Amino acid sequence: MKITVTSASGVEAVTKKEIRKLGYGDAPSINGAITFDADLSAVSRCNMFLRTADRVYITLKEFTAVTFDELFDGVYSIPFEDYFEKDACVLVDGKCVKSVLFATTASQKIIKKAISKRLCEKYKVSYLAETGTQYKVEFSIFKDRVMINLNTSGQGLHKRGYRDFVAKAPIKETLASAMLMLSDFSYSEEFFDPFCGSGTFVIEGAMQALKIAPGKFRDFDYQNFAFIDKKYYQTALEEALDNEDLTKKLNFHGADIDKKAIDLAVRHAKNAKLDGKIRFNVADIKDFSSKNANGAIVTNPPYGDRILDKKEVLELYKTFGKVVKNLDNWSVYLITPEEEFEKAFGRRADKNRKLYNSNKECRFYEFFRKTPIKFNKTKEQL
Ligand SMILES: C[S@@+](CC[C@H](N)C(=O)[O-])C[C@H]1O[C@@H](n2cnc3c(N)ncnc32)[C@H](O)[C@@H]1O
């Protein structure tokens, strides 16, 4: 079958690498979606192990349509009875982009009608009770190419299950994980998030370092699907537990000026079963120093429009830059939309790329170490 994995704009290349590492080849990424051939175990494994993906879908069909008749016929030809029971409750949602069929609501109605007609005919009923398992069918019509997908994840995969309350301006776990993968942080040295808020980077970093699967603490919609045997979830969970390496000693910590945020970070670390493995404390960035020559910072500092005003935020970046200057062989990775960031920080980034944080266009700045550390990142971390 065809599996489609979606991820946020700017993150696709990292997700592709993760998919390749799971053993599903080098699939192209088109419009934020990566589609590849695999068997049903890919549904459970991708949901369990992908740290940067948004959702995992079974692609039921792909075809071209420029009229509602073509759309109806294309959808009607899908053997929905192989997937949905007689009492299934099928929800349809989606989007039309750069296509002749540009009306999303009308397309949604046509698709729902075609599914209902097919199921009524196959089950020989005049209407569908829709009292049973919920199935979310998502369509995308992009440049007249229709994709009909079944959402197997349910809620977005950034919902890991450990973050039950949110602090101010939290970053999505999937984006934090992608930033960590783009960085050179290592389990064998100090890792620090000076603006840790609810603890996302430190927790995601520790989960990567200890090989704790991101899907370990949550459920997925496919677990309720009658056509997917329960063994698939069980096998993926067993693989996840086998992979874990909880014996590593970490020097990973986060700090925040806000006590409430630190209380949340501690709570979330506990939820992720990381208490005792990582640390959080209330502190101002201006007071940070380290006795370790090597280390990495990956962070999401305040932005001018969210927590502090622009002047305060640039002042904070200036302080951050001075603190980092006193660190020996450390790297710094951070995301911000502030165009004057580098000027305030007092250093030009070695590299920067566009990334979106909650739909806000940002830049991901990378400041390398003086001497790169020697470790094989793909082997050690991912
Ligand atoms: C954008 S939020 C970080 C959110 C975090 N990544 C998360 O996922 O929850 C920025 C954080 O910086 C903290 N902060 C602001 N000024 C600070 C300072 N001078 N020193 C340390 N933390 C500060 C704020 O309290 C806030 O929690």
Image (cartoon, grey):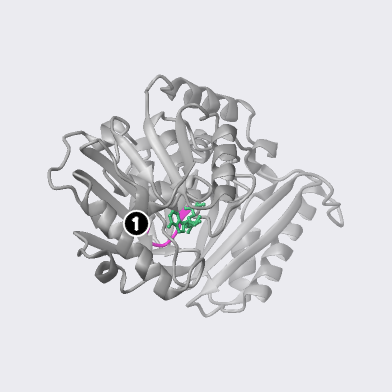
Q: Main secondary structure of the magenta part?
A: loop
Q: Residue at x 43, y 22 (%)?
A: 246
Q: Is residue 313 depicted above or below 256 in this figure?
A: below
Q: Is 128 contained in the magenta span?
A: no
Which residue: 65% across, 43% down? 221
* x then y, percent, for residue 257: 48, 52
Between 381 and 206, the residue placed more toward the observer is 206
Query: Which quadrant would residue 32 be assigned to in this image?
Result: bottom left
Q: In the figure, is residue 222 to the left or right of 178?
A: right
Q: Residue 25: percent from the left, percent from the top?
A: 33, 42
Looking at the rendering, the stretch of residues picked out in magenta corresponds to: 6-10
Q: Nearer the viewer, residue 3 or 168?
A: 168
- Does residue 134 appear left or right of residue 163 in this picture? right
Residue sitting at the far left: 371
Residue 345 percent across, percent down from the top left: 27, 64
Q: Residue at x 58, y 77 (%)?
A: 67
- Residue designated by label 1: 334
Q: Secondary structure at mark 1?
A: strand
Identified by mark 1, the residue type is Leu
**Considering only vertical position in the picture, is 322 above or below 305?**
above
Horizontal side, residue 139 vs residue 46: left or right: right
Residue 273 spot, x, y in % from top left: 55, 29
Q: Is residue 337 visible?
A: no
